[in-house]
Amino acid sequence: MSVIPQDPIWINETAELERLCERWNQQAAIAVDTEFMRSTTFFPKAALFQVGDGQGCYLIDPLAIDDFSAFQGVMRNPEVIKVLHSCSEDLEVFQTFMGQIPTPVFDTQIAAAIAGHGFSLGYAKLIEVLMNVPVPKSETRSDWLQRPLSKPQLQYAALDVAYLLVAYGLLRKQLKQNGRLAWVEKDCADMLAQAERGIDFDQMYLKIKSAWKLNRPQLAVLQALTAWREEEARARDVPRNRLIKEHALWDMARYQPTELKQISGLEGMTARILKEDGDTLLSIIAESEKLPEEACPLRLPKPLPPEQGDLLKSLKHFARETAVTLGIAPEVLVRKKDFEDLVRSGMENSDYSLNERLSGWRREVVGQGLLTLAQQWSAGQR
């Protein structure tokens, strides 16, 4: 293996970045990573963009460079694959800072899982597995917005992209050999599509635990409150639960208070919330209560009943056996929600169906078998 450049190269001038971008636009792939801070804010604050191109590890300073148009062009160049590891948060950094996400992307964590190296493998572990090279992680919780960055921070940031292109090459070779490269490309494309779609504020109530316990008018209140929290958290740039906690939203939806003193008695409600947002919350609740029931969200499904336990166990066993045959972790193929969606789809009339995640390559590999098993199980219960 040739010597891999590891020394950090600091880039804090637009002209130098533009020169590098001209070169990167000619490459088939580049390694990309970000460092950011988000301890007290809703949005991540970009502190560093790292690029590895096989010739160097470049650390781009967003606090010094005011024109990122050339870099944006590279990130959107369809001919240049951006190689990242576990990139969901990185995509958010790009979206927040540049108003766009990189595309196309090859996520080495997804690739490693499908190649059979383990589910949700960290970057350091991946490099150790593929290359037997230790990668220190001592600066993970550093203050990346400080300037100047310390020497250990600079080295850490450089190492985060130093080995990525080599890992990409090794994984791509393995995936081609076992016919799974298209699986990774599809999962990465789906991930980007989801990131591009963004979040529907009106669907945020679905993420609230125990929302299934609420009736339709109560869900209408919860829907309005969670949409308000999402909008306000973004506008004020504060974490959702710092603005108002999840269980407080659920309590308001359930009890539908009409006075401030009723809100003040709910767990997690602070004097600050009452003073700044109490009247607004009461107004949201009152407006939601005016909705006719047919205009309210449908009730959410309850937890699966015990009588579905045998089917669920059979489906999970089949998925585990399939995963063992393929030499990959079961979670790569089917997740908890996938099993539950399949079981729920046939509870009323045994007309089982697969959700979106079990379409594509997963349908052929495991989905059709799960579907057949569910149908056979249902026939045996009649």
Image (spheres, grey):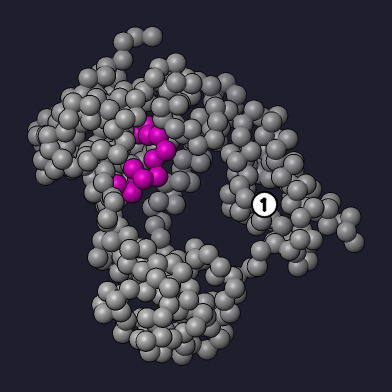
Q: Residue at x 31, y 30 (%)?
A: 138
How far across and down, in percent of the image, does residue 98 sit?
Answer: 24, 48
Q: Is residue 223 visible?
A: no
**98 lies above or below 52:** below
Amino acid on which the number 1 mark rests in the picture: Phe
Please provide the residue range marked out in magenta.
Answer: 79-93
Q: Residue at x 32, y 67 (%)?
A: 243
Is 275 placed left or right of 16 in the picture?
right
Quadrant containing the N terminus is top left
**Helix, strand or loop status at disc 1:** helix
How far across and down, in percent of the image, does residue 379 sit?
Answer: 87, 56
Quadrant containing the C terminus is bottom right
**262 lies above or below 199:** below
Residue 364: within the magenta? Answer: no
How far across and down, in percent of the image, does residue 378 sit?
Answer: 83, 57
Residue 80: within the magenta? Answer: yes
Q: Quadrant of residue 169?
A: top left
- The residue tagged 1 is 339
